[in-house]
Image (cartoon, grey):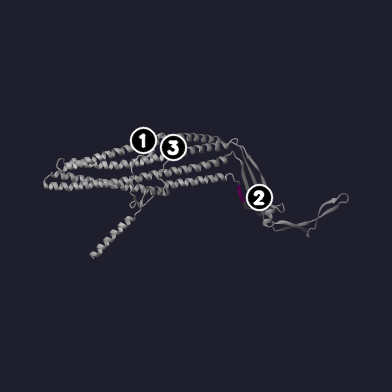
């Protein structure tokens, strides 16, 4: 039985290691590409692009003629004129009417042409907005990825600090047992170990939260099994930092979509103003109407002599008083003509032109033009503001990158000094020339210096990415 349990435990351990080794580890390129495919905000921007395409199809449709068919069938019940005899009778009659109407705009103040040009601008603006959304998501994913790397390395630093403290605890216990150091030093070391364990837990929690943030950007549900590939990003000065901020700004002004969006919105506002002004002009439409009618009443098919009253007096001959007789005839009624025969015989056509000249329309056109002018001024201000914002962002990114590099170099120098100080403190403590409190302080400062190097390293890497991004270098280099 014990052997069975032993082999089962071995199998579970091996299986767990295999599953763990098979867990996919995401690179930063895979994370960014996956986010660009799955992110909800990007999908919404893609839907906006589809709407812009629909708007263009609608603008093209304004140039095409409108064609509409209509039909009706009616019943007339009560006192109606008999269309066959011309007499008023209480009867029920039925009629079917069919029609086809076509119309086309010949001139409409160039509104259709301006709407088509506006729809093209709308598609361009939607593409720019989609591009900006992809850039924002790429930056957010890259930042979240680097935060995970920082958290992972920080866990290593804190675990190393804990191992040093636990090793120091064992040595102190030996010294206390030997009577070389007071028991109070042992209590201080135990407190330091407990504090280091708390730091390890805090670092692990930070790592977990960082994974959750990136998993949410990627729309992943199982973030606990989400792992990223360990990547080594060397710290080196980017060629972009050699350039002046003015040069980077001029390049960004030409390539960044923020300014392109503002310029396109300005062109859209100018086109809207032309569309609004077009309503002041007359419009000319051509029209054509085809209609026919089908009746279901009996029709006159002929006449026959009236046997009961063969003649009737319609007058007399002057002088002889001889009656003038007229033969009486009765109507012969037959069924209505076939449907398609009536359709052909009763058809009619109507066509022509219609001119509409706006004279007074409650100031609706005037107010529409005024609103368009206000929107145009807003777009001009928005363009100026976007250029100012871009300039500020470029200078800020340049300054941040320079500052981050200096902070990293200072942190490296501080770490070297703290390393030597900690080594010297351990040597002094070993020979009894330093108390445990001072040793703990040296160790804490050394650990903080290690964490600061990691933090400034990834802070610099991200800020350089932002600066290169404004210069037109993509977040992820395509292979």
Q: Look at 20% across and 44% down and name the residue there.
A: 192
Q: Earlier in the sequence, mark 2 or mark 3?
A: 3
Q: Among all residues in the image, which is located at the extreme right?
A: 319
Question: In this rendering, which labeled residue sits more in front, label 1 or label 3?
Answer: 3
From this view, report whether residue 206 is shown above or below residue 306: above
Question: Which is nearer the eye, 107 or 328?
Answer: 107
Left or right of 179? Residue 237 is right
Q: Earlier in the sequence, mark 1 or mark 3?
A: 3
Question: Which is nearer the eye, 1 or 44?
Answer: 1
Question: In this rendering, which labeled residue sits more in front, label 2 or label 3?
Answer: 3
Q: Among all residues in the image, which is located at the extreme left?
A: 179
How many other residues sit within 10 Å of disc 3, few (<14), some (14-19) or many (≥20)? Answer: some
Residue range (magenta): 66-70
* Secondary structure of the residue carrying numbered label 1: helix
* Secondary structure of the residue carrying numbered label 2: strand
User: Which residue position is annotated with label 1?
Assistant: 399
The prevailing secondary structure element of the residues shown in magenta is strand
Residue 358: x %, y % from top left = 60, 36
Give me the disc on residue 291: 2
Left or right of 312? Residue 447 is left
């Amino acid at each position: 039985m014990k052997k069975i349990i032993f082999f089962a435990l071995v199998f579970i351990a091996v299986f767990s290691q295999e599953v763990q080794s098979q867990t996919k580890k995401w690179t930063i390129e895979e994370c960014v590409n996956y986010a660009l495919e799955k992110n909800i905000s990007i999908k919404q921007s893609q839907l906006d692009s589809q709407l812009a395409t629909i708007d263009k199809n609608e603008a093209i449709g304004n140039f095409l003629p409108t064609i509409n068919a209509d039909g009706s069938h009616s019943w007339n019940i009560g006192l109606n004129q008999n269309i066959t005899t011309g007499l008023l009778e209480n009867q029920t009659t039925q009629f079917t009417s069919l029609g086809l109407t076509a119309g086309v705009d010949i001139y409409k103040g160039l509104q259709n042409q301006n709407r088509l040009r506006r729809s093209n601008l709308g598609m361009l603006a939607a593409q720019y907005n989609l591009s900006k959304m992809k850039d924002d998501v790429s930056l957010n994913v890259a930042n979240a990825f680097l935060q995970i790397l920082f958290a992972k390395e920080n866990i290593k630093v804190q675990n190393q600090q804990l191992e040093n403290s636990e090793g120091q605890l064992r040595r102190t216990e030996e010294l206390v047992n030997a009577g070389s150091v007071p028991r109070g030093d042992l209590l201080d070391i135990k407190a330091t170990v407990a504090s280091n364990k708390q730091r390890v837990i805090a670092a692990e929690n930070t790592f977990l939260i960082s994974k959750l943030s990136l998993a949410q950007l990627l729309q992943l549900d199982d973030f606990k099994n989400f792992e990223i590939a360990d990547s080594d990003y060397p710290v080196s000065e980017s060629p972009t930092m050699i350039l002046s901020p003015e040069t980077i700004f001029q390049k960004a002004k030409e390539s960044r979509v923020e300014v392109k969006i503002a310029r396109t919105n300005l062109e859209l506002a100018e086109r809207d103003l032309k569309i609004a002004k077009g309503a002041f002009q007359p419009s000319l439409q051509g029209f054509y109407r085809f209609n026919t009618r089908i009746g279901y009443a009996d029709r006159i098919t002929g006449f026959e002599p009236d046997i009961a009253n063969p003649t009737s007096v319609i007058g007399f001959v002057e002088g002889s008083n001889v009656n003038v007789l007229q033969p009486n005839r009765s109507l012969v009624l037959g069924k209505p003509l076939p449907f398609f025969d009536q359709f052909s015989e009763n058809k009619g056509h109507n066509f022509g032109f219609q001119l509409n000249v706006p004279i007074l329309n409650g100031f609706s056109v005037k107010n529409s033009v005024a609103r368009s002018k206000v929107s145009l001024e807003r777009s001009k201000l928005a363009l100026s503001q976007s250029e100012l914002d871009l300039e500020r962002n470029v200078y800020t990114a340049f300054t941040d990158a320079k500052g981050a590099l200096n902070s990293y170099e200072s942190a490296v120098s501080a770490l070297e000094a703290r390393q030597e100080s900690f080594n010297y403190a351990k040597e002094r403590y070993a020979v009894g020339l330093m108390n445990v409190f001072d040793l703990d302080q040296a160790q804490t400062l050394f650990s903080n210096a290690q964490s600061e190097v990691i933090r400034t390293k990834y802070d610099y890497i991200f800020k350089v990415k932002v600066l290169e991004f404004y210069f037109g270098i993509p977040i992820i280099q395509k292979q």
